[in-house]
């Protein structure tokens, strides 16, 4: 079966590459993937695969027969990024770019769909193909799909997903069991002071000073309110306040993110942040309003599914190309599936071999090597087959 899958992947690669270029050229933002969704629907129709629509633009394909059901997931949305590559198929939708590789994820899942359709009679169960909208925007397409029943009818037993990874060269495959990505919450602060002439600070309350002290205090919180063996990060990524050299402003706005693998600490930290931030600002006569928007939970890779995926990997990529993924504090809404059913997620190296470093995900110059899609689609198909037939 391995050979059949690999040969089929090689055979359809040119078509999948042209799918990828078409999707890349026509990117759409989260929850607005209307044309992308239509494109996926028309390709599934050509393959004779039945599908239904969920969450507006999500396309859920189904093939095979039997009691077991495994799901493969690809995210389909693009980012509000102005593309700065020189690709001949660069974005035609100005200000929107597939800068996170979801064009490749979508194409690889279409490739896996075609491979699996060609061996459908040999599958001991069903495969659900989840083309998921809005990975990049809260509350995340995954959570909406789950609410709308994507893991039911037929009930899904396990799910696999993949992401391109610019940190590893093409041909490499990286995964790990346990936590591989963090929870990701959004933080929005307003620090309210009292405006006054900059030369008469005693007549007001300075929100810039309060904000500065708050940011420094957060460094203390991260060392003194967290077990040093637990991973976590709190970053203030944006700060705005003031307009002139001689005015203490009325308020300061800040934005940032809190990330962790530990759900208990995360909840505790939400409480502490609300409480302590205001206490610190009060010392400076200011008031702190903090809005915490709970984002994605951490991504947890099920041990036995990860082991199963590694068996396919060793055969497809070669053992020497399989590396341990070092967990990152990135966020991924694939995490929501893992809270309901066993799930595992892996990373596909896409760095061109002649480049020492390539732009990171979400960068306007991201230009991944496309060839790893061959192994990526074979991998999805093989792991689905193995789960249904040999697990
Ligand atoms: Zn992204
Ligand atoms: Zn992504």
Image (cartoon, rainbow, N blue to C red):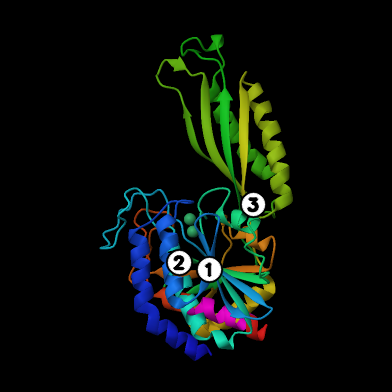
Q: Which residue is mark 2?
A: 41
Tell me whether the residue at label 1 lies in contact with that at label 2, contact meaning CB atoms closer than 8 angstroms: yes
Residue 85 is inside the magenta segment: no
Residue 347: percent from the left, percent from the top? 51, 68
Residue 381 is inside the magenta segment: yes
Q: CA distance from mark 1 to mark 3?
A: 36 Å
Residue 123: percent from the left, percent from the top? 59, 85
Judged left or right of residue 268, residue 371 is: left
Q: Which residue is mark 1?
A: 51
Question: Under 8 Å from ligand 1: the CB of mark 3?
Answer: no
Front position in the image: 340 or 37: 37
Residue at point 32% right, 60% down?
Answer: 25
Please state the extent of the stretch shown in magenta in the rendering.
378-387
Q: Quadrant of the C terminus?
A: bottom right
Q: Main secondary structure of the magenta part?
A: helix
Residue at point 49% right, 57% down?
Answer: 57
Q: Which residue is mark 3?
A: 260
Label 3 neighbour load within 10 Å: few <14, some 14-19, many 20+: many
Disc on the earlier residue, 1 or 3: 1
Quadrant in the rendering for residue 268? top right
Q: On residue 386, which mark appears?
A: none
Is 303 above or below relative to 239? below
Front position in the image: 90 or 128: 128
Numbered disc 2: secondary structure: helix
Is 173 above or below relative to 263? below
Label 2 neighbour load within 10 Å: few <14, some 14-19, many 20+: many
Numbered disc 1: secondary structure: strand
Front position in the image: 27 or 2: 27
Tell me whether the residue at label 3 lies in contact with that at label 2, contact meaning CB atoms closer than 8 angstroms: no
Disc on the earlier residue, 1 or 2: 2
Front position in the image: 213 or 193: 193
């Amino acid at each position: 079966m391995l050979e059949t899958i690999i040969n089929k992947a090689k055979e359809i690669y040119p078509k999948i590459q042209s799918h990828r270029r078409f999707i890349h050229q026509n990117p759409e933002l989260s929850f607005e993937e209307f044309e992308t969704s239509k494109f996926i629907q028309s390709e599934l129709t050509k393959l004779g695969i039945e599908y239904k629509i969920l969450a507006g633009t999500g396309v859920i394909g189904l093939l095979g027969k039997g009691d077991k059901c495994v799901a493969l997931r690809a995210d389909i949305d693009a980012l509000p990024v102005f593309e700065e590559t020189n690709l001949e198929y660069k974005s035609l939708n100005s200000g929107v770019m597939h800068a996170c590789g979801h064009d490749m994820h979508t194409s690889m899942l279409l490739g896996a769909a075609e491979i699996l359709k060609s061996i459908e009679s040999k599958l001991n169960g069903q495969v659900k193909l989840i083309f998921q909208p809005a990975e990049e925007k809260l509350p995340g397409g995954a959570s909406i799909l789950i609410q709308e029943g994507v893991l039911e009818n037929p009930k899904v037993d396990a799910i696999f997903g993949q992401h391109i990874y610019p940190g590893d060269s093409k041909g490499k495959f990286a995964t790990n069991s346990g936590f591989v990505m963090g929870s990701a919450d959004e933080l929005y602060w307003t620090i309210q002071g009292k405006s006054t002439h900059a030369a008469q600070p005693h007549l007001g309350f300075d929100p810039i000073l309060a904000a500065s002290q708050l940011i420094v205090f957060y460094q203390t919180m991260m060392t003194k309110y967290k077990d040093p063996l637990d991973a976590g990060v709190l970053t203030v990524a944006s700060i705005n306040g003031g307009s002139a050299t001689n005015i203490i402003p009325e308020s300061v706005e800040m934005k940032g993110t809190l990330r962790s693998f530990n759900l208990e600490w995360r909840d505790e930290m939400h409480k502490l942040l609300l409480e302590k931030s205001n206490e610190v600002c009060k010392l400076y006569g200011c008031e702190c309003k903090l809005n915490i928007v709970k984002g994605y939970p951490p991504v947890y890779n099920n041990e036995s599914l990860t082991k199963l995926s590694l068996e396919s990997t060793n055969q497809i990529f070669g053992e020497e190309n399989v590396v341990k993924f070092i967990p990152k504090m990135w966020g991924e809404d694939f995490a929501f599936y893992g809270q309901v059913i066993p799930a595992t997620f892996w990373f596909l190296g896409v760095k061109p071999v002649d480049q020492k470093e390539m732009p990171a995900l979400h960068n306007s110059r991201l230009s991944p090597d496309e060839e790893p899609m061959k192994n990526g689609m074979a991998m999805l198909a093989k792991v689905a087959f193995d789960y249904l037939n040999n697990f």
